[in-house]
Image (cartoon, rainbow, N blue to C red):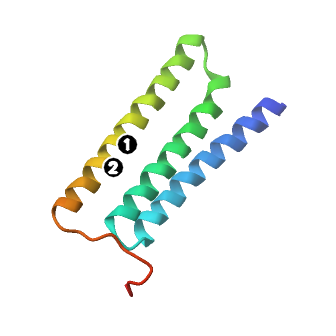
Amino acid sequence: MTWIEWGQTLLLVAGASFYVIGTIGVLRFPDVFTRVHALTKADNIGLGLLVIGLLPSAGSVSEGFKLLLIWTVVLAGSATSGQLIARRARERGVVPWSARDKR
């Protein structure tokens, strides 16, 4: 394996690890706000690492731009959906968790 392939492997494993960590955060955190935060941040970083890891394997420049375009669309969609979920939770009276709460 070349150094580029080792770097790609490292980035792909790190990206997949962020997805797993985000999923654990969704299962472990106490309220909707911390869950949305964990999911959107971990998924965005994980997808970014996956895209960067796949870029050297792209067959052409247009395929590389498509990967980057997918990442930017997912970034925008994730931020928008996370914000809408948090806003709706606030409208319904969900109170953010604090360290003083015993849950």
Classify 18 as above or below 34: above
The x and y percentages for residue 102 are: 39, 87
Determine crowd level at label 1: few under 14, some 14-19, many 20+ residues with C-alpha closer than 10 A: some
Q: Residue 99 lies in what quarter of the image? A: bottom left
Residue at 36% x, 74% y is 97
- From the image, tell me which residue sits under label 1: 79
Residue 88 as seen in the image, left or right of residue 28: left
Classify 66 as above or below 39: above
The x and y percentages for residue 48 are: 56, 37
Disc 1 element: helix
Q: Amino acid at mark 2?
A: Gly
Residue at 63% x, 42% y is 12
Instruction: Check residue 11 in the rendering and tell me which mark sits there, or answer none.
Output: none
Name of the residue lying farthest toward the right: 2
Quarter of the image for the N terminus: give it: top right
- From the image, tell me which residue sits under label 2: 82
Front residue of 80 and 22: 80
The x and y percentages for residue 19 are: 51, 52
Residue 17 as seen in the image, left or right of residue 40: right
Residue 13 as seen in the image, left or right of residue 19: right
Q: Circles 2 and 1: CB distance less than 8 Å?
A: yes
Disc 2 element: helix
Front residue of 47 and 33: 33
Name of the residue lying farthest toward the bottom: 102
Front residue of 74 and 33: 33
Rounded to the nearest angstrom, the CA distance separating label 2 from label 1 is 5 Å
Residue at 61% x, 20% y is 58
Quarter of the image for the C terminus: give it: bottom left
Classify 29 as above or below 1: below
